[in-house]
Amino acid sequence: MKTKIRQFIALLGVMVVAAACGGSPADTAGGAEGPPQRGGSLTVLLSSGFAGSWPSGLDPATNTTGGANLTHMNAIFSGLFKLVADEDGSNARVEPEIAKDYDFADGGKTVRITLRDGVEFSDGTPLNAEAVAWNWKRDLESTCTCAPNWPVVEKDPITVEGNTVVLKFTQPYAAVINSLVVSNANWIASPTAYEKMGAEQFKIKPVGAGPFKVVSNRLSSELKLTRNENYWKENRPYLDNLTIKSVGGDQPAYQAILAGQAHVYEGMVTTPLINQAKDNPQVTVTQQPATSPYLIQLNTSKAPFNNKKAREAIYYATNVDAIRKGLFQNQYPAAQTFTGPGGLFHQEKVPGYRTYDPDKARQLVKELGGLTVHLGTIKQYVAEQVNTALQSQWEEVGIKTTIESHELNSLIGEFNSGNWQAMLQTAGAWDPAAGVGVAFRFDSQFPFSGVKDPQLDKLLDDAAATIDEAKRAELYEQAGKLISDNAYAPFILAFAPANVAASNVHGPGVTTKIPPVLVNTGIIWDEVWMSQ
Amino acid sequence: MAIVEASASPALLEEAGQGRVRGWLRHLELAFPIGLLTLIIGACFFWPMIAAVPQPVGGDVLESNLPAFSPGHLLGTDPNGNDVFSRILYGGRSSLVVGVAVNVLGLLVGGTLGAVSAYAGGKIDAVIMRLLDVLIAFPSLVLTLAVAQSLGPSQLNTIFALAFFSVPAFARVSRAATLRLREQPFMMAAQLCGTSTWRMLFRHIAPNITPQLVTFSMLGMGIIIVIEGALSFLGLGIPPPAPSWGNMISQGQQALSATPMLVVWPCVVLFLTVLAFNLLGETLRGRWSGR
Amino acid sequence: MTVTDPALGDARETAAPGVATRILRSPSLRLIVRRLLAAIPIIIGVSLLTFIVLSLIPGNAAQLLLGPEATPEQVEAMTRQMGLDQPPVQRYLDWLGGALTGDLGTSLVSQQPVTSELGVRLGVTGELVGLAFLMSLGFAIPVALLAAYRPNRLFDRVSMLVSITGLAVANYVIALLLVLVFAVQFTFFPAIGYVPLSQGLGENLRSMLLPAVSIAFPLFCFYTRFLRGDLVDQLQGEDYITTARAKGIGPWQVLLRHAFRNSSFGLLTVVGLNLGTLIGATVIIEQIFALPGIGQLMLQAINTRDFVVVQACVVVFAVVAVLANLVTDLLYAVLDPRIRYGNR
């Protein structure tokens, strides 16, 4: 007890000195010190509301929450491709990992992925083109929503040529590689192990070719992994053991790291805690480059938002800068379109975008003869706070606003019923075409906006099909402009969670920046190490 | 609820000394909780009418997380720029309204059920008691969670959900009291005179068991306010941004280490209110049982 | 105990049909059997009620599991796979049939057997509740004895004041304050999580201490008040105490040997009744401290609409509550012959 009190006093002293120096010591603690060291057991915490939930197991063909469980899946399976970036998060790019190379043929209708030779699963069986084809056929047949929604041809979409897998589409699909890094199809499971264990067992203890293999797995609670001695990269991973634990939220996770119970927490979103952690020399806080913006989805097919004036009123009534400052202490940039500065095709401003103008908003409300809005969102701390702030701002200009937070279940129900009016959501991804990207929020076939705009559908489809980067950028620019001109959905700010690590942990994605592909950053676990 | 019911402990300051000190203490044990409750209820329901208290919602987000004693914000503001003091007052309203409503429901429905069950005896008693046994064996919080989930969070639904706690508890107290009453000579006398069942229930039983039920409801207030907090804590009570003490605690604990006072203030008023109801209940029970 | 024991010999002779029959005829045993039989409809009632309440909750597990991207066809297929397309009566009967043979079904979400999952988690919750009882009684009994030894003196007053104050503190408030002080400010104790016994008793207890104290403190306050009140009642009102005193037995002896012995029956009953209410407490406390117990499992399952798991948790809770009440009732009846059972 006594030493603890002394430590505490010493810690207080350090904090006072650090504060007096004015600098934030956490920022400098992030850089790797000395050469990486082998060994150590690391515990990583994930929020039970998102990444810390893996109720349907970890088989890539059936894990419905795969997009959230990047850490689990990358640790067990590694991936055909991975997203890397420079230390400051710039120059993000998709690089081949287990794949060696890829090329497009047939104008983007065929993609050929060649595999690295000699890669083996942790059970010693080879990871070759045959294994990938076996996995992909299973993925495509799976009823899981995690199944890849590739526009594949009916007959023999997947073929094997030597150590190359060939995938054939009905239309050009250039975004396939970029979207692989958030797709369950990026993770290749051992066919031999699957046949041996059967589907139910394999969900619990899947076998892949990643840096770690499963020791034990209690769904949505704790996953224990140990070093894969058969890993194809020489002298990797650095860590001996990796334990993934689910935790109730930011606060308990932060406490656990301070108490030494865990070493890394992925996805901190609570601003006051992020700030507190940044001032604490015991931990390193890495704020990831913002990709997915918060936006207000409006049901444009139903009153009141089938009227453009009502939508414009929302644009003018929303004071983005006040929300950025008041709720987020200016940590996140304002957004006017569907990508953030950390993502591809980012555009800071959209010409003609309607920004905060309370007088215009009041005028429009008056012209409409009053406006009543029901604004919903998912039950999550940050989203609820934004909604509360929006309610105050809209009320200020005379828009009568009620707000409601939904469980995921009732949120989906609301969308599917078509009776909703406005929802605070996030849109976009590192690549707008990847995963549940932009199309998901605006395409005619989805219920997440009332927008049924063939022009927008075509722009987004074309952009996903185009290989040429400059051309794609232009298409997305047009799409952004179209959304803005029609006042389809006001964007608020580009958001990304922060990763918090004990000061002795180093590694790409933990203490360096990598743009989150979708929500969380894909940490490159075989490079993570702890100084002893 | 079983906790309270099974307890038969005497009043706090029973047999407190002699003479004047004793009288003074006896006075205090009633005056203190009543005074505290008057203060809390007065502040929650009447203070905002007299004084200029900011609205509990609709704050300016630019005034977020102000510390206590900031100008215009006695206890500071929350992350949305809402005045914490005002939220505590208005939150008290919802907590107290829920508490009163649930206890009144429990008293009326549960009290009647218990009295009828005990008075009728036989098959009716057996059926009612088996049903209540099921409700009591059922983990109440689970039932409340399920009801709150199926009805969706709102103040009215919270009241209905919590009534599942209070009705069986009141029924048990009322049944026990009625059973004791049945043995009394005046009841025998009334029965022998051929008094009708309804008359028996309303004229003889109800007035005699009411003091006990009211005393129990004082303790019940404390319990219900705490459970309402628990429900809000789990995100199934009164939905924010409308304040309740429970949802203030629940919201505040998400950044407990950074802004602890957002949790401390509602905890303090919650504690004081429950304490006042408990003290009052204990004192009344002591007086009622003849001490 | 030898055959020469005259009392036993007598008993054997009078109980001509043999010991076995005699035991069968014993009122205690008949009471046990009758109460056990009465518990069955209660537990079935609880499971039925749970089933009804759960089927009223909107939203289905299939949709939740599949997420927002799912097409209606996918949801339908999953619903069928989960067996949720069967009529409710059929599903309930299927479940009941399984439950009677000890099979509580497979989780809708994880497709794993519920019984084994419950077994693991029951250990955690059991330890939490057990520790809380141990702590609360361990402190409440001596405090109550000391308080009752000299009623209305300083110690009594202070302990009564502390306990009525403590009763007004909600367990989640205690938990948050404990976390704030001991886990955030001073990090004496781990803030969250559970260390299994296999990793050492010390670490295990360290991880359980704060949660157990959060539950134990209000219980301690309650037991102290209850026991102290009962002891004082006994000491003042009961004839046997007067007799004992008249025989010249010392005050501590009277308190311990006589009054406490009697009061402990009442305390026991209260402890039994509390077991049911404690379950509510574990749901919240396990949530705050991230303990992998049944409460946490149930809350997760409610949120994912995994009704098979919720149903199993509720039934386990109900069985524990009913059994606890039964045991205390029986102890009461066995220990206190004044209570007549079954004559009403």
Image (cartoon, coloured by chain):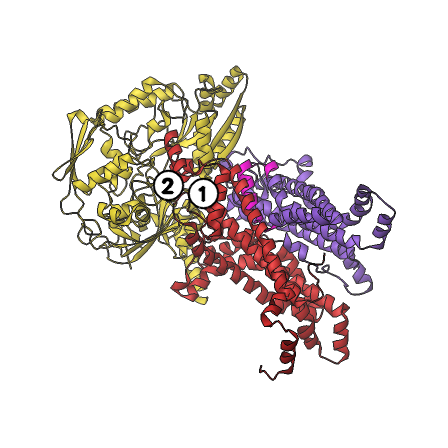
Chain letter belonging to callout 2: A
Quick check: B51 left or right of A124?
right
Question: The residue tagged with tag 1: helix, strand or loop?
Answer: loop
Mark 2 crowd level (few <14, some 14–19, many ≥20, 10 Å Cα): many
Nearest to the eye among marks 1 and 2: give it: 1
A295 vs B177, left or right, is: left
Q: Residue furthest front?
A: C17
Q: Main secondary structure of the magenta part?
A: helix
Towards the viewer: A37 or A17: A37
* Residue A318 % position (x, y): 46, 27
Q: Which residue is mark 1?
A: C306
* Residue B231 visible somewhere in the drawing: no
Task: Report x, y in % for residue C95.
Answer: 47, 45
Instruction: Judge by depth and name the residue closer to the eye, B67 or A341.
Output: A341
Which residue is identified by label 2? A497
Q: Nearer the viewer, residue A468 or C91?
A: C91
| Residue C229 horizontal side relative to residue C207, left or right | right
Which residue range is magenta in the image?
B136-157
Say whether marks 1 and 2 touch (CB < 8 Å): no
The answer to which of C101 and C135 lies nearer the viewer is C101
Q: Colour in which chain C is shown?
A: red
On-image quarter of the C terminus of chain B: bottom right
Q: Colour of chain A?
A: yellow
